[in-house]
Amino acid sequence: MRILFLDQFSEPGGAQQCLMDLVPAVIARGWKATVVAPGEGWLAERARAAGAAFHCVRCGPFTSGRKSLADGLRFLAQTPLLARQIAALPADVVYVNGPRLSPPAVSCCNHCAPPG
């Protein structure tokens, strides 16, 4: 089983800690874990230390809190590239750990052939 974990942040927060509590259990079960996030940081370091692969994607930068029109336009422009980057990584299951990477994940999954 190959599980692709997508996170919108590279630095620690509650969701990232939960993800990193889950990854070692996935690996202990003999499954392959790949963590994807923007930038090298705490999450990349922890994922690799746990035995997961890590892939950096370009997502942002975005302002904190309320998003500006520029943030929205930047995200729209980045979504197709993010979808291609996600689609290029082999996975049986995709775990999206935050809403920002949901649109590109859904976009790439809509182009996948159903299992047959």
Image: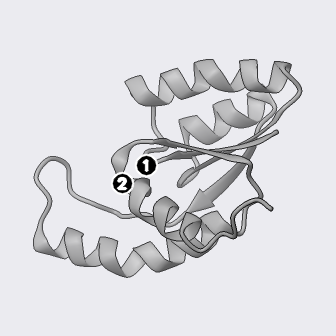
The way the protein has been coloured in the rendering is one colour
Res 15 → quadrant: top left
Q: Position of residue 21 (x, y in %)?
A: 60, 18
Report the number of discs.
2
Q: Residues within 10 Å of mark 2 (few under 14, many from 20)?
A: some
Task: Give me the residue at 43% from left, 63% from top.
Answer: 59
Task: Give me the residue at 14% from left, 59% from top.
Answer: 67
Q: Position of residue 43 (x, y in %)?
A: 57, 37
Q: Is residue 60 left or right of residue 23?
A: left
Decide which of 22, 69 is in the foreground and name it: 22
Quarter in which the N terminus is drawn: top right
Secondary structure under badge 2?
helix
Label for residue 100?
2
Q: Amino acid at mark 2?
A: Arg
Res 87 → quadrant: bottom right
Decide which of 19, 108 is in the foreground and name it: 108
- Please tell me whether residue 16 is drawn above or below residue 102 in the rendered image: above
Task: Give me the residue at 66% from left, 36% from top.
Answer: 45
Q: Work out whether mark 2 precedes mark 1 in sequence or the reverse, and give the earlier one.
A: 1
Say which residue label 1 marks.
8
Residue mark closest to the camera, 2 vs 1: 2
- Please tell me whether residue 52 is drawn above or below residue 8 in the rendered image: above
User: Residue reaching furthest right?
Assistant: 30
